[in-house]
Amino acid sequence: MSSVNIEDYIPVVKWEGLNTAKAVVFGSTLAVTGALTASGGVAGAVAATTLSASDLVTIPNPRVKVTVTDYDAQAATLTIAGLLGGVITQNSKTGASTAVTPTGAQISAGVSGVAVGFSFDCLYYNRGNQTSTITAGASGVTVYGTAAITTLKTAILKFVCTAANTWSCYVVAGA
């Protein structure tokens, strides 16, 4: 088995440093090779083996900083970079508009370490004076929910990988 870096599974370690005021609990046995230093007491036996990652899940594309991407266009083709930035705005200024997602292959190419079950969210805001409709890219994306976002309203777009280069986009319209 290859080695596992704990910071790839627990974002607080990689991005903000280990918060030692909080307990780290694993669903199975934690085994450590090499020296182990602990303070405050260690419960149970300590054995020299390897860390099993079977119960750990990688958190893809964690956001430390949100980027707002504005589409000042009636028909906008959203980019994976814009979606992963976390906030999309669109100006639906002269009539009903559309916001087209990237294709499933484009989304998969933009998500590091993508696998079935991975997901990410993006906030969409229709800042214009017309209804904007979220539509699926050419292939590999299916849009579910209330895809028509009315004037000055927001929606959460939740993308979930369901198969290789295949994504579901759940639109949860807000007030």
Image (spheres, grey):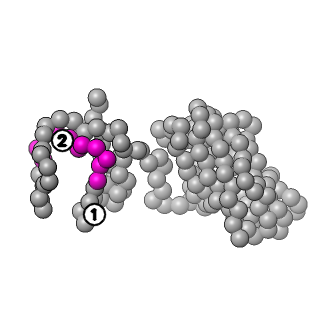
Q: Quadrant of the C terminus?
A: bottom right
Q: Is residue 19 left or right of residue 127?
A: left
Residue 118, position in %: x, y?
A: 52, 43
Identify the secondary structure beneath mark 1: loop
Q: Is residue 80 magenta?
A: no
Question: Pointer 1: what residue?
Answer: 22
Question: Pointer 2: what residue?
Answer: 32
Dot 2 amino acid type:
Val
What residue is shown at x 71% (from left), y 42% (from top)? 142
Identify the secondary structure beneath mark 2: loop
Q: Quadrant of the N terminus?
A: top left
What residue is shown at x 14% (from left), y 54% (from top)? 43
Marks 2 and 1, Cα distance to the nearest angstrom?
A: 20 Å
Q: Is residue 45 left or right of residue 10?
A: left
Q: In the rendered view, would you say 105 is above or below 62?
A: above
Numbered disc total: 2
Q: Is residue 82 left or right of residue 33?
A: right
What residue is shown at x 64% (from left), y 59% (from top)? 156
Q: Which residues are magenta?
A: 25-36
Residue 36, position in %: x, y?
A: 12, 47
Q: Is residue 31 magenta?
A: yes
Q: How many residues crowd mark 2 within 10 Å: few (<14), some (14–19), many (20+)?
A: some
Residue 173, position in %: x, y?
A: 71, 62
Q: Is residue 89 visible?
A: no
